[in-house]
Amino acid sequence: MTTKPTVARVAGALALLVLGVLTGAAGWLVVDLWFPGGLLLALLALFGLFLGGRISLGTGFGVGGAAAGWFLSYVLLGAPRPEGDFILSSSGIGMYVYLLGGTVLAVMCATMRLPADRPVSASGPAK
């Protein structure tokens, strides 16, 4: 199903970009704070954001906006500060699991087929 980008969809994708930045920043901080539970909590928040973007915009375009914001937060938090230290410490395995797990969740949500994606025939019920 291909749809043309409208003003509402572009605005929705930009809103998802901002939500992705906020969710990504909160997720990176929670993973560092509470390692096993924080990692699961952050991945669940990402899954909810990506799935919500997929359902709200009806295409993978919504997941792309949220995933771009999530990755942008990683780039902004991973850049060194002028003092020479980092805001985001990537010393533990939790950060790598969060980065890989978030990527897998984004691809999974972008490529899934929802019941609304199937064509409906006027002659009979949808299967």
Image (cartoon, rainbow, N blue to C red):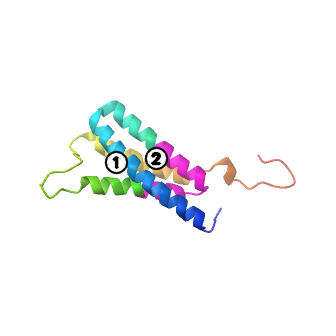
Nearer to the camera, 108 or 74: 74
Nearer to the camera, 45 or 96: 45
Are the residues flagged by discs 2 and 1 in contact, CB closer than 8 Å? no
The kind of residue on which mark 2 rests is Leu
Please check the rendered image and state whether residue 41 is part of the magenta-colored stretch, yes or no.
no
Percent x, y of residue 10: 54, 64
The residue lying at 48 percent from left, 55 percent from top is: 16
Please check the rendered image and state whether residue 63 is part of the magenta-colored stretch, yes or no.
yes
Q: Which residue is mark 1?
A: 25
Disc 1 on helix, strand or loop?
Answer: helix
Disc 2 on helix, strand or loop?
Answer: helix
Nearer to the camera, 51 or 12: 12
Q: Quadrant of residue 96?
A: top left
Q: Which of the image's four quarters has the N terminus?
A: bottom right
Q: Quadrant of residue 121?
A: bottom right
Percent x, y of residue 68: 42, 58
Q: Is residue 64 visible?
A: no
The kind of residue on which mark 1 rests is Ala
Q: Residue furthest left?
A: 83
Counting the numbered discs, the total is 2
Q: What residue range appears in magenta?
A: 47-68
Percent x, y of residue 95: 29, 44
Q: Which residue is mark 2?
A: 105
